Image (cartoon, helix red, strand yellow):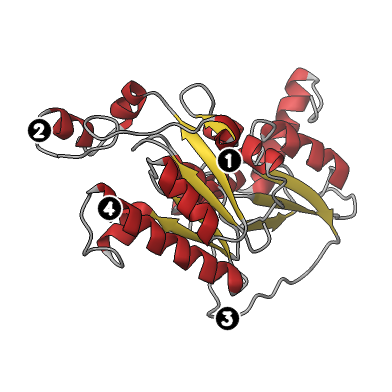
Amino acid sequence: MSEETIWLFGLPCSGKTTLAEGLLGPSTVHLDGDYLRNTLNSDLGFSKEDRTENLRRAAGVAQALNEQGFDVVASFITPYRSQRDLIAETIENVSFVYVNAPVEVCEERDVKGMYEQARNGEIEGFTGIDAPFEEPEGEETGLEVQTATHSKEESLEKINTELDLKFNPSHIFIGRWQPLHDGHRTIIDSAADNGKNVIIAIRDTELSEKNPLTAQERQELIEDVYEDHPNVETMIIPDVDTVAIGRDVGYSVVSVPEEVAEISGTETREEYEKNELLTGQHLED
C-alpha cells in the first residue's frame, strides 16, 4: 500500500481485527476500534451520535497518518451508511472492505460473551442484537469478504488482489534450508500462520556434501510446503555471509524453544540419506 487507508467494517467478531493484522506491513499503522475506545475516545458512549464521533476522530487520525507517509488499516464496526459516507469525505484515499459474517457465526466466535450479555439485556445498543447494522448497498458494497465460508488466507488474498496491494513483508527468513525441517517450520510458521507476509530467502550455496540440493530444488520444496499460504513468498539470494540490521529501530529476532533450537539440519539430512538407503527413494520424492 502507498499512503492509503483500508477500512474494514462489519459486525462484532466478524473477523475484522484478524484480517487487519494480516494486512500490516513495515510502514502500516493499525487503528483498532477497541483500542481507540479505551484511549483517545474513552469519553464517548454508544449512542449513534457518540459512535459517529468515535469514527470521525478515527478517520481524522487515519488521514493525518496518510499525510505523514503511513498506510493505515482500520477495523471498526461502522454500522451506519452515513458514518461510512463521513469517513469517505474525511480520508482522501480510502478503500472499504465489508467483512461479512452471519450474526450466528459471529456469536459462536465471541469468546468475551458480549452477544450473550446483549441478549440478556446486560449490554444495551449492541450492534447486531438491539442496534442496527446497515449493510452496504449498490456502489457502496465495494469489496466484500465472507469470513464464514472463506479462510483467513483466502480473504487476505482476495483483499490484496482486488485492491492491488503491494506485498509488504513484515518477516524475512534467510537460510540454506538444507533441507527444510521442523525447526525451520516452527520459526517460519510463527509468522506465516498468523497472517504475516513472509519472504523465505534461499541462499544460493554451491553444491557439496553439506549442501546437496540446488537453490531451485529447495525453492520448489518450500513452495510445496507453503502452497496454501498466499502470504508466503520465496526468493533465491546470493550466498551471503552476514546480514546487518539497524539497532533499536523495531526489528527483532524470533525466539524459539530450546528443543526446537537443537534440531539439526545435518541430522535431518543424514536421516533422509539413511532412509534412501533402506527404501531406495530419492530425497526429492
* Disc 3 versus disc 1: nearer the observer: 3
The residue positioned 84% from the left and 42% from the top of the image is 213
Which three-letter amino acid code belongs to the residue tagged 2?
Gly
* Gap in angstroms between the C-alphas marked 3 and 4: 45 Å
Left or right: residue 253 versus residue 200 is left
For this orientation, the residue located farthest to the top is: 279
Which three-letter amino acid code belongs to the residue tagged 4?
Glu
The answer to whether the residues at label 2 and label 3 have Cβ atoms under 8 Å apart is no
Q: How crowded is mark 1: few (under 14 residues within 10 Å), some or many (20 or more)?
A: some
Q: Position of residue 161 (x, y in %)?
A: 70, 39
Residue at the spot of label 4: 49
* Gap in angstroms between the C-alphas marked 4 and 1: 53 Å
Above or below, 81 against 146 in this view is: below
Q: Going from the N terminus, do you reach mark 1 or mark 2 first? A: 2
Q: Which secondary structure, mark 1?
A: helix
Q: What numbered label is drawn on residue 182?
A: 1
Q: Going from the N terminus, do you reach mark 2 or mark 4 first? A: 4
Left or right: residue 186 versus residue 166 is left
Q: Going from the N terminus, do you reach mark 2 or mark 3 first? A: 2
Q: Position of residue 176 (x, y in %)?
A: 75, 52
Left or right: residue 74 versus residue 70 is left
Above or below, 73 against 124 in this view is: below
Residue at the spot of label 3: 247
